[in-house]
Image: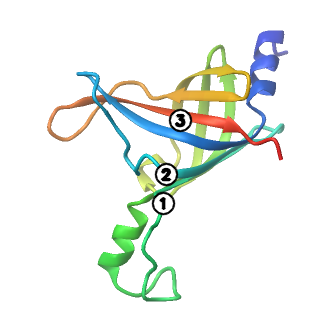
Amino acid sequence: CRDDAKLRSMTDLNGTWSLAAWRRIAGDGSVSYPLGADARGLLVYTENGRMTVQIAASNRPVLASDDPLGGDAAARAAAYSSYLAYFGTYEVQGQEVVHNIDGSLFPNWSGVKQVRPFTTEFDQLVLRTPPMSLAGGTTVINELAWKRDKS
């Protein structure tokens, strides 16, 4: 049996969300935008516990091939490096949402759990990653701000 707070949190998340900003905040307070300040994205949480997320850099170049698995490998790698996508199930545990990832464009995430502290206020949702180390020793937190789609 789920408690009322957990049900309220799951209800708060259900629906579709458009990306407002993906900010990467370094330990020194500097902010960068991994896919650009104008990246676009969609996050969906369903009532039955499924989820999916897609985030793309704006103005991605078109590939010279109509085959998504063919053509120039370097061009495909560059294109796919400007896109993030995964799907799976989710559950709310207090003020954290757990994404149980079934499949991901980044194969290292397939089959793993990602825990994200979250806050909701009105029609805004903010997810944060735990601190992570990047190449070069920089520690960052990714903060993804979403706005509820009302259509």
Q: Looking at the rendering, which quadrant does residue 17 occupy?
A: top right
Q: Is residue 151 left or right of residue 101?
A: right
- Percent x, y for residue 6? 76, 16
Q: Mark 1 packing: few (<14 Cα in 10 Å), some, or many (20+)? A: some
The kind of residue tagged 1 is: Ser
- Percent x, y for residue 44? 71, 44
Q: Are marks 1 and 2 in contact (CB under 8 Å)?
A: yes
User: Mark 3 — residue?
Assistant: 113
- Percent x, y for residue 60? 45, 68
User: According to the image, what is the colour scheme of the structure?
Assistant: rainbow
Earlier residue among tags 3 and 1: 1
Q: Is residue 148 left or right of residue 75?
A: right
User: Mark 2 — residue?
Assistant: 39
Q: As rendered, which of 10 and 143 lies closer to the eye?
A: 143
**Labelled disc at residue 58:** 1
Mark 3 vs mark 1: in front: 1
Q: As rendered, which of 17 and 76 lies closer to the eye?
A: 17
Earlier residue among tags 1 and 2: 2
**Which element carries disc 1, helix, strand or loop?**
loop
Q: Is the residue 34 above or below the residue 106 in the image?
A: above
The kind of residue tagged 3 is: Lys
Q: Is the residue 12 above or below the residue 53 in the image?
A: above
